[in-house]
Amino acid sequence: MSLISPEWTALLYLVSAVCFILALKGLSSPRSARRGNLIGAGGALLAVVTVFLSAKLDNIPYILIAIVVGTAIAAPIARRVQMTQMPQLVAGFNGVGGGAAALVAVLELSHNSDPWVRLAIVFTMLVGAVSFGGSAVTVAKLQELISTRPLVFPGMRWVSILVVVAALTAGGVVIATGSIGWASVLLVLGLGAGLMLVLPVGGADVPIVISLLNAFTGLAVAASGVVLGNVLLVVAGTLVGASGTILTRAMASAMGRGVSGIMFGAFRGGSTAGSTVQSERPVRSMEPDDVAVLLGYAQRVVIVPGYGLAVAQGQHAIAELATALEARGTEVVFAIHPVAGRMPGHMNVLLAEANVPYESLKEMAEVNPEFKNTDVALVVGANDVVNPAAKTSPGSPIFGMPILEVGDASQVVFLKRSMRPGFAGIENELLYDPKTALLFGDAKDSLTKVLTAVKAL
Amino acid sequence: MDPITLLTVVVLSVFVGFEVVSKVTSILHTPLMSGANAIHGIILIGAIIVAGQADDPWVLVIALLAVVLATANLVGGFVVTDRMLQMFRGRGSVTATAKASGLKGGAQ
């Protein structure tokens, strides 16, 4: 039974769509972001209420139970997940969304004989299944259930091509016949294509994969809106597709590489798996007390955090160090490289969790001109993102990647575990520069020692 | 719905999407991703429609599975985004919470 007219339904869906746009608009500043997200959640609630009031629905008790089950599974996970595990969670939610879209499309197949609608159905099924399969591999890589190195087997390229051709063929048959059997084959091939897409990608390139799969699920949802003739799904899916596309491009340019180079790099052997050559050249190492003096009497300090900081769980220690330095009148800012962390913007979340105020978090374009007026650049658990080889040696794998110009600061201090090169496996000339000092050890340990020494100054 | 109207909606949404998302500060790229994730969870209404029209038990089972997955996506996405965003505090409000974090830091 329909309680509200189609006009009212369309109007309420329009309000929901506007809520979603406002949710994304809110993210232009941390001040308005939380309110925006609540508006988005309100829009989603409104849409769900609207569908119950407007469509002729049977099985309502079952549907309500399914909603309760879904909430009971997701809400506790979303509340408890650690911020370092955020990439896995986002990839996981992304995968289930893609899976849901694919299932909805399969079930719509029997109601539609129009070839164009069937084309939209096939598109939704294929892209949704790719997103589900790809996200599953991404989660497994991030949780280190499987190796984070690129997984390639001989002839993989041909198997991939075969899977894609078979999937397109199955899609064609589904459009022509509407067969549910072939639709199932298509779903399985889509899952396979998702696996083949992500398995060859190395751990360092996962931020791009997450963004890309996010865009895929958005497109699948938009196409399902075409199938169901539902404008809200079209708008919501397209918005997500746009955000995923922009983030994918932003990540790729932050790595100085094309998206296709990252996705298919392992096939060509130009992946991020690097050598582990160690140099015997002398470096200047420093004790925590000396680092404390250097920092404590500086006018301006820029901290460059890398994922190594998060691995060592040193976020809270570095936040306390920043507070202690600010109490002494030193200006402290954090310089965040776009690919610091395991997903776009990840490092900002980790530092926000440690109570670093967002005004102190500076993006690369903003902070790079300021290194000239900086007394000390403190690099913690980062290497490739400050490696001048990205600018100076055209042969290096990271050449062309924009870097944080810490070399412009008067002094540079690296907190490092060892002299081992970073993810990309390239030597960092900056480590041997006369103005550079190194403090070896676990990031959290070193930071705690430096903090104690700063407090004693 | 007629194809031209649908095409109009798609094209305008693409432009609105690019316009709004390109203004998102890079500090908030992770919440952007999880928020966008939550938004595509709205596939839930599609799942509810197919479940509500199911007359075959197998169709109903698959549709309800889609409802569970979509709900997990939608609810989990908004909850985790809210949790992240409440951690982004300005300079003024950090001092108020510094005590709490100081205690937490000491306990670790």
Image: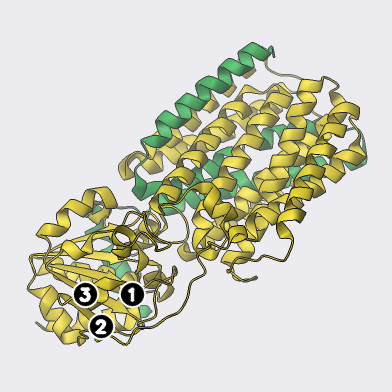
Res B105 label: 1
Q: Which amino acid does label 1 sit on?
A: Gly
Chain identifier of the residue bearing label 1 in the image = B
Residue bearing mark 2: A439
**Splitting the image into 4 quarters, where does residue A33 fall?**
top left
Alpha carbons under labels 2 and 3: distance apart: 7 Å
- Tell me, yes or no, if residue B44 can be seen here: yes
A299 w.r.t. B21: above or below: below
Residue A274 position within the rendered picture, expressed as x and y whole percent measured from the top left: 48, 71
Contact between marks 2 and 3 (CB within 8 A): the answer is yes
Tell me which chain appears green: B
Q: Which residue is located at x 67 percent, y 27 percent?
A: A225
Q: Which amino acid does label 2 sit on?
A: Leu
Residue bearing mark 3: A413
Q: Is mark 3 on a helix, strand or loop?
A: strand
Q: Do labels 3 and 1 share a chain?
A: no
A100 w.r.t. A432: above or below: above
Chain A: drawing colour:
yellow
Q: Which residue is located at x 70 percent, y 28 percent?
A: A52
Alpha carbons under labels 3 and 1: distance apart: 24 Å
Q: Which residue is located at x 36 percent, y 47 percent?
A: B26
Residue A247 position within the rendered picture, expressed as x and y whole percent measured from the top left: 46, 44
